[in-house]
Image: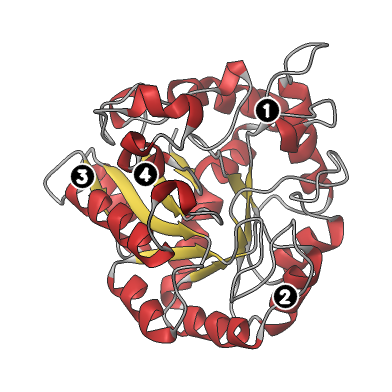
Amino acid sequence: MRIFDLHCDTIDSLAFADYGAFSEYVQGARGGNLVHNSIQLAADRMSCPWCQCYAIWVPDDLAPFGMGALEFYRHARDWFFAHTSPEGPVAQVRDARLVEATLDEGKVAALLTIENGLPLTNLELVDEAAADGVKMITLTWNAANPIAHGSQAHGGLTSYGHEFLRALEDRRIVADVSHLNDESFWDVARAARRPFAASHSNARSVCGHPRNLTDDQFRAIADAGGVVGINYFRGFISDRVTGFDAPADGEVTFDELAAHVEHFLDLGGEDVIALGSDFDGSETPDWLDACEKVPAFHDRIAERFGQALAERMFFANAHDFFVRNETA
């Protein structure tokens, strides 16, 4: 069994633990690093070969941090660089074709990503992100930014957003449409020349949250050769959830999460679905609330949908997508 997870917020929870802006994650994160910590994702609790997309989440509201978006990004990036190394247990991978070799060395393969393109206000800064080894950028978070409009805003891809999308594609940085509103999503789908991703989004037909994908959106990603990461956040799994906590009538179940997998498979998504845990950035069901519980999740998916599908969903689809992005 191998894991390739398209999204987590572990960098923020550790790099900004002393800023007091990460609620329940902050206390457990103080003093932690990518290998040893008491939050959801830690290398010393990964019991199988693991490739992780480590996102730098840039909040829409940076007032609690007392810094601008670019300063925020650079602080988190420098923290990531300080806690990864070719010789250490967590190694940054700048070319997805090296993921398997990194795993064969017994290391966690770490891909740097950005959630919210807010810091990248000009194309020179896109060049900086490319030089940093950023492999994927979620265009917005929930609000509007100079690129596009998030799920809580109204409007589409901006004129700069069209330039930004082309710049990402030219630099082989994956455009990530998770968090976009529907108008911005379709602007990206029409403008994209390369496959794109929804790193952590579920099926809106199963759970009606606007952060989830409609059937037509999923088909558009699939038709473009893209990938979609299944999100573990309770509120994107079940309509029974109205906040962050487990619903009063019982925890979100495996069957409720499996319904998203089944629905995407019904749409022809066997080569599209992947993992997008949202670890260390959301409230996940108690049976899937830490990395050491992912192997049992894999076994349940294999039992329900077959071993071949589990291998594709848990590793091969995401891995093959990023390799294609390096070479196509």
CA–CA distance in space, label 2 to label 3: 35 Å
Q: Residue 197 falls in which quadrant of the image?
A: bottom right
CA–CA distance in space, label 1 to label 2: 31 Å
The answer to the question of whether label 4 and label 3 lie on touching residues, with beta carbons closer than 8 A, is no
Q: Residue at x 16, y 50 (%)?
A: 85
The residue where tag 1 is placed is 244
The residue where tag 4 is placed is 11
The one nearer the camera, 92 or 69, is: 69
Inspect the image, locate mark 2, and give the three-letter code of the amino acid beneath it.
Ala
Q: How is the image coloured?
A: secondary structure
The residue where tag 2 is placed is 189
Task: Please report whichever mark, 1 or 2, sits nearer to the chain's N-terminal start.
Answer: 2
The residue where tag 3 is placed is 83
Query: Residue 112, how many percent across, how many down?
Result: 37, 57
Q: Secondary structure at mark 1?
A: loop
Q: Residue at x 69, y 29 (%)?
A: 234
